[in-house]
Image (tube, helix red, strand yellow):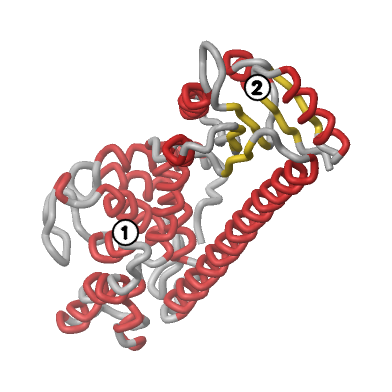
């Protein structure tokens, strides 16, 4: 038992009594005579529980807790649990104290056993709550990890439909995340676009394998089937209410900056930003992957194609970032 308890009271006898009882019970006790000293102390010392008298000169307990909560908010600190000490039986005072965030009241004069039990019970309860929060956070992380595993598995299933593509969705997701990072997205948005990239081609589940894997030129009808996959993908992902952004990557990654893409013919900034990023990453990976009719395209040619597409196929800002990544890849390792 090393819990740190601070007692604030202007009565020296109460401070001495509380210090003796709580120290014998195994707590680390600090005694202070007024609220101003408490604010100075809290700023420098961790505290597990505060016993705060209501009736004090200069700053009473209510003023003190208000000042404490304001300091905690301003400094991004967790709230210190508070028990008010009071000799007043006034129900209004108790209601006010609870409204200000006090967890309990202890009447003065207090008995040794009552003080120990009330303090111990409250600290144990707070400890259990913290443990519960940690367990919930742990389980949430496990569920998120499981969800990511499911998404990876689904992405591999999609890629497996194409006999000539291995790991396409994973690479598009990685390139998209890197472009987003360099453009200034925070970590949460980087992870969101990574998930969008993993599932951008999910609609290909609804396209026949014979069409996807046809080695020769597609007929107009077959190309029309291929062009349905963004809408099919958006319809599938629209059911994932927890991650509404997934629809963005699936539906609009084949839009072009000049408006000549599909399925909706969006142009410029009307195309969601994440979809514009994925479009660059997707085109890059298409050129740097094996196909039935060709090998990986040489890096210089890939660079030229990205440059040619700036302002027409691609948003120039994201194409330039892709070109930076190509320039840094001196050994040409960014390919299938």
Q: Nearer the viewer, mark 1 or mark 2?
A: 2
Name the residue: 46% across, 35% down: 93
* Label 1 – label 2 distance at C-alpha: 54 Å
Establish if 227 lies above or below 104.
below
Could you say where residue 42 lies in the image, as x and y percent from the top left?
A: 63, 23
Residue located at (37% from left, 45% from top)? 303
The residue tagged 1 is 245
Q: Label 2, secondary structure: give it.
A: loop
Residue in the foreground of this view, choosing between 137 and 332? 137
- On the image, the x and y values in percent for residue 221 come to 16, 83
Taking 248 as reference, is 81 above or below it?
above
Direction from residue 306 to residue 6 in the image, left or right: right
Q: Of the residues under marks 1 and 2, which one precedes in the sequence?
A: 2
The quadrant holding residue 79 is top right
Asked whether disc 1 touches disc 2, contact meaning CB atoms under 8 Å apart, the reply is no
Describe residue 282's horizontal placement relative to residue 263 as left or right: right
Q: Is residue 182 above or below residue 132?
A: above
Q: Taking 2 as reference, is 254 left or right?
A: left
**Quadrant hosting residue 173:** bottom left
Q: Residues within 10 Å of mark 1 (few under 14, many from 20)?
A: some
Q: Which mark is residue 116?
A: none
Secondary structure of the residue carrying tag 1 is: loop
Residue 246 location in percent, x, y? 34, 62
Q: Quadrant of the N terminus?
A: top right
Q: Residue furthest top?
A: 58
Q: Residue at coordinates 52% horizontally, 11% vertically from top-left? A: 58
- In depth, the one of 194 and 295 nearer the eye is 194
Determine the residue located farthest toward the right in the rendered image: 24
Query: Toward the viewer: 264 or 48?
Result: 48
Q: Which residue is mark 2?
A: 9
Q: Position of residue 154 (x, y in %)?
A: 46, 75
Front one among 184 and 296? 184
């Amino acid at each position: 038992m090393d819990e740190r308890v601070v007692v604030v009271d202007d009565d020296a006898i109460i401070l001495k009594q509380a210090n003796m009882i709580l120290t014998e019970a195994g707590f680390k006790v600090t005694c202070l005579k007024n609220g101003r000293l408490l604010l100075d102390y809290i700023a420098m010392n961790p505290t597990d529980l505060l016993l705060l008298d209501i009736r004090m000169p200069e700053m009473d307990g209510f003023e003190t807790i208000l000042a404490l909560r304001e300091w905690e908010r301003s400094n991004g600190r967790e709230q210190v649990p508070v028990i008010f000490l009071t000799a007043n039986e006034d129900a209004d005072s108790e209601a006010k104290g609870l409204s200000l965030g006090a967890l309990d009241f202890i009447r003065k004069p207090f008995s040794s056993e009552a003080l120990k039990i009330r303090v111990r019970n409250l600290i144990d309860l707070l400890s259990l709550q913290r443990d519960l929060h940690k367990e919930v956070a742990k389980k949430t992380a496990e569920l998120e990890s499981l969800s990511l595993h499911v998404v990876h598995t689904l992405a591999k299933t999609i890629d497996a439909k194409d006999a000539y593509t291995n790991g396409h969705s994973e690479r598009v997701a990685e390139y998209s995340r890197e472009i987003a990072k360099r453009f200034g997205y925070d970590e949460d948005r980087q992870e969101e676009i990574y998930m969008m990239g993993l599932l951008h081609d999910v609609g290909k589940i609804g396209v026949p394998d014979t069409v996807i894997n046809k080695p020769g030129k597609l007929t107009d009808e077959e190309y029309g089937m291929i062009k349905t996959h963004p809408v099919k993908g958006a319809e599938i992902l629209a059911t994932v209410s927890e991650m509404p952004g997934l629809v963005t990557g699936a539906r609009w990654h084949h839009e072009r900056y000049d408006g000549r893409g599909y399925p909706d013919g969006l142009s410029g900034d009307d195309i969601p930003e994440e979809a514009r990023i994925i479009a660059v990453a997707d085109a890059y990976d298409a050129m740097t992957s094996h196909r039935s009719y060709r090998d990986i395209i040489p890096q210089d040619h890939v660079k030229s194609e990205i440059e040619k597409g700036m302002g027409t196929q691609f948003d120039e800002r994201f194409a330039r970032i892709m070109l930076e990544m190509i320039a840094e890849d001196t050994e040409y390792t960014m390919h299938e």
